[in-house]
Amino acid sequence: MKKPALIFSYIFNPLLIPVYATLFYFLITINYFHTHEVYLVFIQVLIVTVLLPVSIFYLLRSLGLIKTRMLLNKNERRLPLAIYAVLLFILIKHSLADFVLPELYYYFLGSLISITGALALVLFNYKISLHVLGVSSLTVFVISISAYYHIQLLWIIAILITCCGFVASARLLVKEHTLSGILLGALIGIVPQVLLWFAWLFPVV
């Protein structure tokens, strides 16, 4: 059972979730943008949320600031989470305009709030599941897009909700987190996205 659990952990790695969200967004809205605009935003998201964090992670390992590959130690999470929060802020500030890409803008703003919350908890020596945080926020984002564009996406939402359960079970199975860490990860992933609905979704609905 541990092998499928590890597969789910890799598929829904927290660093990949923003890429999935961006791909999904442009698949839905492809007719509203020029091809070069899609490529430009996607490449920026890929660089800032995946390539740079991975490069910085290995730099920190080479400097001896991180010793475990999966950031198992609570103290080791502090610097990577802080750096990732800064990268998300830069992406939001300089690459995503709220009047051009409001859906992505508020998704990443919610992600920034979630990561900041995770960092705050780490500072108080509490570890939550970043995997569950990521897949939960992605699920809420898909629900948001479905409501915003009035598109029937029930089967995708159902699959993502099922994946949330699988990811949570996988993290418990490999004994990476406690049940409270799983539940709190889901809560911190969901709540900021839902609260931001008041900024962009509810006026439309």
Image: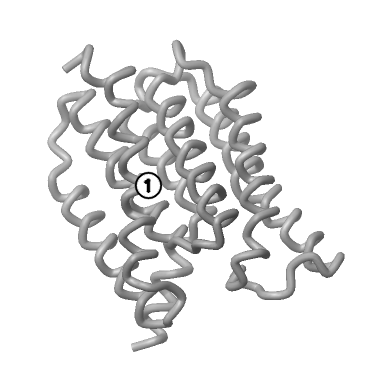
Task: Please state if 48 lies on the left or on the right of 109 as rendered.
Answer: right
- Residue found at the far front of this picture: 124
Residue receiving disc 1: 189
> Which one is nearer the viewer's eye here, 51 or 53?
53
Q: Which residue does the image show at 36% across and 82% down from the upper left?
A: 173
Asked if residue 104 lies left or right of residue 67, the reply is left
Q: Looking at the picture, tell me which residue is in the foreground, 27 or 44.
A: 44
The quadrant of the rendering that contains the C terminus is top left
**Residue drawn 59% across and 43% down?**
46
* Kind of residue at badge 1: Gly
User: Residue 192: x, y in percent?
Assistant: 36, 36
Kindly indicate the quadrant of the structure image that contains residue 151. Answer: top left
Location of residue 147 in the rendering, given as x and y in whole percent from the top left corner: 18, 28
Which residue: 59% across, 54% down? 123
Position in image of residue 157 (x %, y %): 20, 48
Q: Is residue 122 above or below residue 111?
A: below
